[in-house]
Amino acid sequence: ARKIIIDTDPGQDDAVAILMALASPELEVLGVVAVAGNVPLALTEKNVRKTLELAGRTDVPVFAGCDRPLVRPLVTAEYVHGKTGLDGPDLPEPEMPLQAKHGVDFIIDTLRAARDDGITLCALGPLTNIATALQRAPDIAPRIREIVSMGGGLFEGGNTTPAAEFNIHVDPQAARIVFRCGRPVTLIPLDLTHHCLTTAKRIERFRRMGTRTGTATAALLDFFERFDEHKYGTDGGPLHDPNVIAWLLKPELYSGRMINVEVECASELTMGMTVADWWGVTGRPANVHYLRWVDDEGFYALLTERIARLP
Ligand code: BDR
Ligand code: CA
């Protein structure tokens, strides 16, 4: 199985992505590291533990990473995800422990101990933990097989400011470090996730599974949709983070290009914008595999099939 570390800020869509990974034998989840993002760190790490307990996977270790972005003050998104970050389903308070080790140390130590075929980092939130690990321990870079990050966008504009997507907007300096790290970076931008709509019909399939995870997934997506559906005027809201996992499982669902992507870190107006050179006009070397299109029916079929495997 392909070894992955999930770095995340749950978030309903983060939770669904974690569930999808846990249900997939092609992937071995070495650990889940929380970062501050959608809500503060004390809540995101707790939400990770709630999600693992829901899946019955308390064997996977959970770590808390950075509680704020590298440079900028933390911006959260309770207006999207609710007060807890995981509003919607009625999940019990978690009992499984949080590991004592700092999440960034876990990333560094795990990569240092890895074999040559490396470890894939799945980034579902701001890139603070991964950038901190790269800065503190540059020797880990060769052990990274691929960094798959949900973030950014070009053609669809931003969802947090007109120019910026949430994950990149929260920590643009971290995104810049990661995009320039020299290892393969695959980006899942809004251009793609905005075509992965949580329609009523798709949510219904989870509810009808009759399992606790199916029911919780429906409740997570119902809550998440409420905000985004009104915002975008579509049937259902966009589903972002599970695409990171689906890309690893079925890359044939996706298409895009190798392009140069730089991150705006200075202008207040466009802070966190992913300046994606889709037409190759700059001559700057390609550093990002920018996925632009997804087979959304194929994506939902895969997600549904995986969630159905959980208790
Ligand atoms: C991203 O921001 C968060 O609100 C979601 O979990 C996703 O990672 C979308 O912009
Ligand atoms: Ca997220």
Image (cartoon, rainbow, N blue to C red):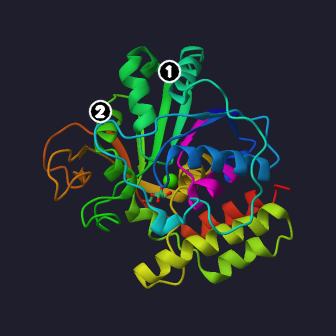
Q: Which residue is mark 2?
A: 180
Q: Is residue 62 magenta?
A: no
Instruction: Give the labeled residue for mark 1.
Output: 143
| Rendered image: mark on residue 100 | none
| Whole-percent x, y for residue 190 in the image | 39, 62
Q: Earlier in the sequence, mark 1 or mark 2?
A: 1
Above or below, comparing residue 160 to residue 22 in the picture: below
Horizontal arrangement in the rendering, residue 25 relative to residue 176 (left or right): right
**111 with respect to 161 (left or right):** right
In space, the residues marked 1 and 2 are separated at their CA atoms by 16 Å
* Magenta-drawn segment: 4-19
Dividing the picture into quarters, in which one does residue 159 lie?
A: bottom left
Q: Which amino acid type is shown beneath numbered disc 2? A: Arg
Q: Quadrant of residue 212?
A: bottom right
Inspect the image, locate mark 1, and give the three-letter code of the amino acid beneath it.
Arg
Residue nearest the observer in this picture, 63 or 186: 63
The structure residue drawn at horizontal position 20% and vertical position 44%, both measured from the top left corner, is 265
* Residue at the image position 59 percent from the left and 21 percent from the top: 110
Q: Position of residue 165 (x, y in %)?
A: 34, 58
Does 89 sit left or right of 166 as displayed? Answer: right
